Amino acid sequence: MESENIDVAFFQDLETKLHKKEVRNSPKLVSELLADDFIEFGSSGLVYDKSTTLNSLGKEEVDLEITVDNFRVQKLSEGVVLVNYKTSKLNPKIDSNFESLRTSIWKFLDGKWQLIFHQGTRIEA
């Protein structure tokens, strides 16, 4: 995959699947998207692995409205891409909004793209 031929829409769709409540609440769907050695540095400051992510997402009750801006994809090596973007999250139940800068690394493993790293950094809205 040449960097000038990266399918940005494909990676944005892959990344934003994890923003949807119906995916986030499904351990099976999330497990397919996360590599076994997945790690996340959350915007909360907590560190998550695949197991803790599956457990915490499966219990989420709020369906956040998430807006994505400035989505970019960069090829790091063959079968590895870096994704950067900004999110605005609105919690309609409590009328709360916050923004984060997001970074993900996706790797082509066993015939499919899986997330191996994610970091969210909260920023002032």
Image (cartoon, rainbow, N blue to C red):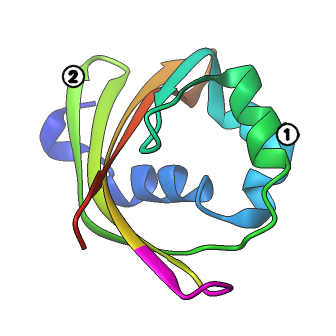
Q: CA distance from mark 2 to mark 1?
A: 29 Å
Q: Nearer the viewer, mark 2 or mark 1?
A: 1
- Residue at 63% x, 29% y is 34
The reply to whether callout 2 and callout 1 are in contact (CB within 8 Å) is no
- Residue at 68% x, 23% y is 50
14 in magenta: no
Q: Provide the secondary structure element on which disc 1 rests.
A: helix
Q: Is residue 68 left or right of residue 58?
A: left
Q: Main secondary structure of the magenta part?
A: loop
Residue 85: give x, y in percent of width and height: 27, 55
Residue 7: give x, y in percent of width and height: 33, 51
Q: Is residue 59 left or right of residue 16?
A: right
The magenta segment is 92-97
Residue type at numbered disc 2: Leu
Q: Give the mark nearer the N terminus: 2 vs 1.
A: 1
**Residue of label 2:** 76
Q: Is residue 67 visible?
A: no
Q: Provide the secondary structure element on which disc 2 rests.
A: strand
Vertical comparison of 80 with 28: above or below: above
**Residue of label 1:** 27
Alpha-carbon neighbours of circle 1 within 10 Å: few (<14), some, or many (≥20)?
some
